[in-house]
Amino acid sequence: MEIFKGTNYVKIFGVRIDKVTMEEANKRLVSYMQGEELKMIFTPNPEFIMKAQDDPEFKTILCEGDLVVPDGIGIIKASKIHHLELPERVPGIELMEKALEYCNRSKKSIFLFGGKPGVAETAAKKILEKYPNLIVKGTQDGYFDEKDELRILDKINELKPDILFIGLGAPKQEKWIYKHRKIINSKVAMGIGGAIDVWAGVSKRAPKIFIKLGVEWLYRLLKEPTRIGRMMILPQFMIKVIFSKTIDS
């Protein structure tokens, strides 16, 4: 079946989503910081899941994440419709902030990878203004050719950040993490989408009322009407959810 229950996770159209609260996700992230092997954190929303339907490699990679949190409100609505028991939405940008708070308390280090040239540097400065005790080991923009991958990887590995935040957009960021997972010299690699742009002030997150009501997508559409084509994925996802067969446990 396309939607079914697991013990500590659910699968929605073949994509695994861990049944965690924000607090539980943060505890797991902190525990990963005590280990030696890289842990992969992915933050799928309905757009990810719909893309994964046409990209089996992306679907497999999402399912192999060490922590896969329900970022989009559509995933939580799908969970309620099919009684999947996902406890709450865990936005990637908020989990990233929890990680930054931990790094600030523990004087851990980060590396920002993504955004247009200069954006990651600006984001790093803004992060340090709020969290002066963490260490920014380095930054790298997201505009690079395949031939530059090893140079970028060498740069990251030489600096050895505790957390590598990658904002290349899906599925590029997840595929990059997975491709290099065995040689990335970090404790955690986390896909964060447009969070680097938000930290840099290039884009703004929706006001709290939109977040509380679960309609951040509407705010983004009002700010950028040209996103209408991309935003149509959410209703397509919900239609697919509503007309799916009942859960097969």
Image (cartoon, helix red, strand yellow):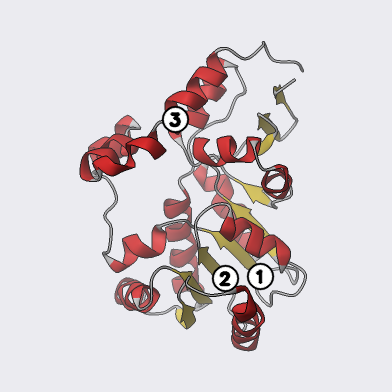
Residue for badge 1: 187
Left-right relation of 231 to 64: left
The residue where tag 2 is placed is 163
Q: Residue at x 44, y 73 (%)?
A: 104
> Helix or strand or loop: what does disc 2 sit on?
strand
Which badge, 1 or 3, is on the more N-terminal residue? 1
204 displayed left or right of 20: left
Position of residue 140 measured from the top left corner of the image (x, y, whole percent): 48, 78
Which label's residue is closer to the chain start, 2 or 3? 2
Residue drawn at x 49%, y 22% as measured from the top left: 238
Return the mark for residue 234.
3
As shown in the figure, which amino acid type bears the numbered disc 1?
Lys
Q: Are marks 1 and 2 in contact (CB under 8 Å)?
A: yes
- Residue 26 vs 152, above or below: the answer is above
The 10 Å Cα crowd at callout 2, few under 14, some 14 to 19, many 20 or more, is many
Which of disc 2 and disc 1 is earlier in sequence? 2
| Any part of residue 199 in sight | yes
Helix, strand or loop status at disc 1: loop
Residue type, numbered disc 2: Ile
219 vs 229, left or right, is left
